[in-house]
Image (cartoon, rainbow, N blue to C red):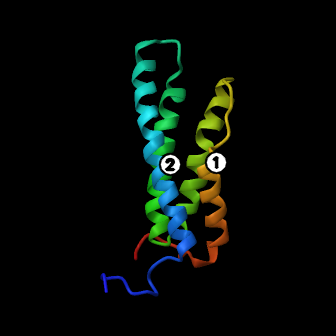
Amino acid sequence: MNGLSSSRRPPFTLRVAAILCCAVGFWSLLPAVIHGAQALGSHTVPWPAVVAPGVSALLIGFAGVLLWLRRKLGVVLLAVGGVLPAVTNAALGRPVHGPGVLLMVAAVLVVMNVRQLRPGMNP
């Protein structure tokens, strides 16, 4: 075996959700850093609008890791990371965009497997 017993591995759909979260987090972090660096040069963009996408991407990526470990905290981080940019933009009066399709697919897969998750952070 590879060190994990079959009873400790997450179900297939939960593994797909965790991989999607990590992929969305990684691919969201790249443009967040690039646009954030460009926006720091101009003083017309408020700092919460610059910081929120990067923090959201990190939260979603970390949620993927926690979901792979079957932790319920991953659901909370996924929800917060998914709505953080929209809430920030709404509070600042900027255009609001919903989460992407891959993030929504991951959220549906997580909801389907919420009974497979355990509370806490310790394995």
Front position in the image: 8 or 83: 8
Front position in the image: 52 or 34: 34
Kindly indicate the quadrant of the structure image that contains residue 98.
Answer: top right
Whole-percent x, y for residue 90 in the image: 69, 30
Whole-percent x, y for residue 5 in the image: 39, 87
Question: Which residue is pictured at 56% across the width and 55% down the height?
Answer: 78
> In which quadrant of the rendered image does the N terminus lie?
bottom left
- Element type at marker 1? helix
> Mark 1 belongs to which amino acid?
Val
Labels 1 and 2: the sequence-earlier one: 2
Indicate left or right for 8 with 45 as reference.
left
Question: Which residue is pictured at 63% across the width and 57% down the height?
Answer: 105
Q: Residues within 10 Å of mark 1 (few under 14, many from 20)?
A: few
> In which quadrant of the rendered image does the C terminus lie?
bottom left
In the drawing, what numbered circle is on residue 24? 2
Distance between the alpha carbons at the discs numbered 1 and 2 = 10 Å
> Mark 2 belongs to which amino acid?
Val
Q: Residues within 10 Å of mark 2 (few under 14, many from 20)?
A: many
Whole-percent x, y for residue 61 in the image: 45, 52
Q: List the residue tagged with mark 1.
A: 101
Question: Which residue is pictured at 45% across the width and 12% down the height?
Answer: 42
Question: Which residue is pictured at 53% across the width and 29% down the height?
Answer: 48
